[in-house]
Amino acid sequence: MRHLNIDWAAFIGKLQTWSSLARESQSALLQLKPNQYLRRDTFDHDDLRRLLDEGLLALSADEKRVRLHPDSNEFSRGIRAMRRHRFVDASDERSLAAYASDHFTVAERFAMLHDSQVHRGYYGSENYQLVTQHRWLKHVVELPSLTAAQEWEQGRMPDQPTSDRFEDGSPYFQDQLLFDATRRLLKAAATWAEPVPLTELAGHVPDVEPGLLHRAIMPAVRYLLLFPWLEGDDALPVISIWPQISYLLHRPEPKPPEPVEPCETFHAPILIEDMMTVLVTAAAEPLRVLANGGGLYAKDLDRIAESAIALPGWLANAADADVALPDPHDSHDSRDSVRISIKGRLAVAAQTCLNHKLLQPCKAHKDRVQLQATDAAHHWLAMDMYERIRGMIHPWRERPRQKDGAKARARTLLLHDIHVGLDASWHDDDQRFSSWTPSRLRWAAGPDIEKIDWRAAFADLLADADGAFVPLEDLLEYHSRVNNPLLGRRKQGSYGPTPRLDFYGQRNVNETYLEKMWVDQAEGLIAERLVPLGAIELGWLGKKLAIRLHPIGRYMLGLAEDFDYKAQPEGSVVIQPNFEVTFLGPAPRAEAMIGRLAERTGSRIGTMFRITRASILAAAAAGVTADEALSDLTSVSSKPVPDNVHREVRGWFSATRRVRMRQAWLIDAPDAHTAAQIVAAVGKNASQMTSTMIEITAPKQDHATLIRKLKQSGIFVQ
């Protein structure tokens, strides 16, 4: 160890003088390095006399300047080192990494902190999160004997020649007295809610003789068990355990969330509604996919959005309208992640329709790709809302169907990866996991993740929101400490094996990190899966969200055998004599059928379509016949189709004609003899229109091939 390898008894003996100095004098002393001089007037007059009397400073030969006294170099080195690192607000390992880099050699850091599971035998694999966990401190305190302490210490010695290994005085646990004193110091430090001034240390560990106590500081600092620094503007030298460990040991007990009464509420199976909107729009006209595989055309998204269900202002994310729902692979800290963007909703809905084969990609003009509704989509739209919801959430009640990952994969076509070459766009979707397994943990965690009962974890979490609204933030924070499968923590029973997590190559991550991770993962699943499926009711408290478990959610969790969802009956559809189509209630199947025959003029309820000559001509161009169109209109209308509408629709269809168009080349020959030569050279695809004009039909060659063939016959094309 470099800068803090000092005589702590002598260091503490000089702290009374240090604390009596004015702030300017302390600052000047911190700037002063060995063999460096400062002017006398840099220090307060009384402070200077005190520093000279205590042997901390010495005068130059001309007595106009001062420098460090040779006997105070060690004190100066220690106090300057303590100023460089402050741990009051340290909540992660970055501050620790900077501290260790300053005070330890690479070999020392590797010996103490290497993670053999990450990089065996290489420097640079130090896991600083080991030190920020209570078990790092607890393990040393609970070492059963001096022999065990010596083995622990030896395992943290750098692998260097003996002459270099013990440069800082270690190993320290060579006698029972020092080992016992160190353990008592650490036990006492674990009880301190705040850092303790070094000058008061003996009073906080009264059962250890001061001289032995001061010796015990060195091994505690050497093995990253205690941390000294200068606290506050007064630069008070203090010492404590790692602040995160102190926080975990002394924070208040978690309190269950209290029921609240929201000022506004909202509930709807948003995803199901959006899927219906997507399929109705696709049934009228296929959805175009961008050539670069970047999703749907913006105009098509706008066309779908016109008919999408509206959300209350406190839930709709107007500022983020072009961004999809939170990516399940990204962590997110803000509770605003439950806010939902319209275009994100539609992208998720389109992807879900692809997954359930309600949409299928097909090639269109110039090899462009479109998504068109399948026959299954029309059948799905004909269901009532209860049947649609039940079908979508049924997999959530099941355990993973297979345990063998190699045999448990399904092929999924991702919307954002659809290109012209459709065969290369399919991805394997791992089916080993329960639907309740948070998405990010499927790829960023160890092999035990699939064995955890995630459904039980969410059942415990949402039990406090069953029957009453509770603040979402309070609910997540409480259960991150009480029922947390990432920490193997459950109030009653177990969720299965505690996973050995590996996030971005980090193992043994600390407790606070895993509490935050569970909050993020639970919040992500609620926002991205449960709310869109109608499993959660949302409430607005003015500044934050509250949630309540819906009967749909109880069914998904296996807490109920069924759920009550009053499905709205298909609304009546009336075709008016003025060609307007009025919907007296939601009727998605009828909407999908009429959408390909009429122009949309509204959404949801009311006058939603108008039958026009242009819309009928567009349907005819798509291959719809007059009989099919009139049959569809008759089947969805609650009243007979008006005679004038019937007559005009058939008339518009009868006015259409179909013609064939083919590609041909015309060649003008100078005379009949040359024309005959051309016909003979080209073959059966050539025919004479006149004695000197030849038509070449269904050409399979390009121009260059034809010109070359004629050239071989002595005929040159100008």
Image (tube, rainbow, N blue to C red):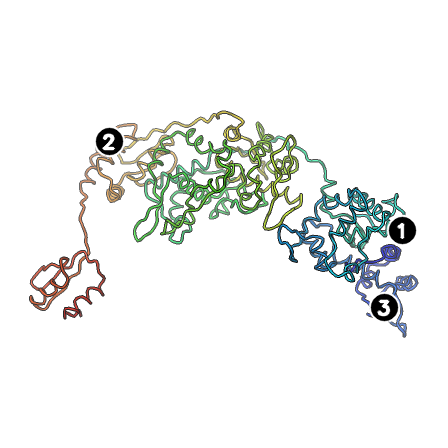
**Residue identified by numbered label 3:** 67
Report, in whole angstroms, how far the alpha carbon at label 3 lies from the one at label 1.
Answer: 30 Å
Q: Nearer the viewer, mark 3 or mark 1?
A: 1
Q: Secondary structure at mark 1?
A: helix
Q: Residue furthest bottom?
A: 62
Report, in whole angstroms, how far the alpha carbon at label 3 lies from the one at label 2.
Answer: 107 Å
The amino acid pointed to by label 3 is Arg
Report, in whole angstroms, how far the alpha carbon at label 2 lies from the one at label 1.
Answer: 106 Å
**Residue identified by numbered label 1:** 211
**Residue identified by numbered label 2:** 642
Q: Earlier in the sequence, mark 3 or mark 2?
A: 3
Quadrant of the rendering where the C terminus is positioned: bottom left
Crowding at dot 1, Cα within 10 Å, few <14 / some 14-19 / many 20+, comes out as few
Between 707 and 353, the residue placed more toward the observer is 707
Between 533 and 494, the residue placed more toward the observer is 494
- Is disc 3 in contact with disc 1, using a CB cutoff of under 8 Å? no
Give the answer, above or below, for where 649 lies relative to 111. Answer: above
Q: Earlier in the sequence, mark 2 or mark 1?
A: 1
- Tell me residue 410's x, y (percent): 44, 41
The amino acid pointed to by label 2 is Pro
| Relative horizontal placement of residue 383, taking residue 625 as reference (left or right) | right
The amino acid pointed to by label 1 is Gly
- How many numbered discs sit on the rendered protein? 3
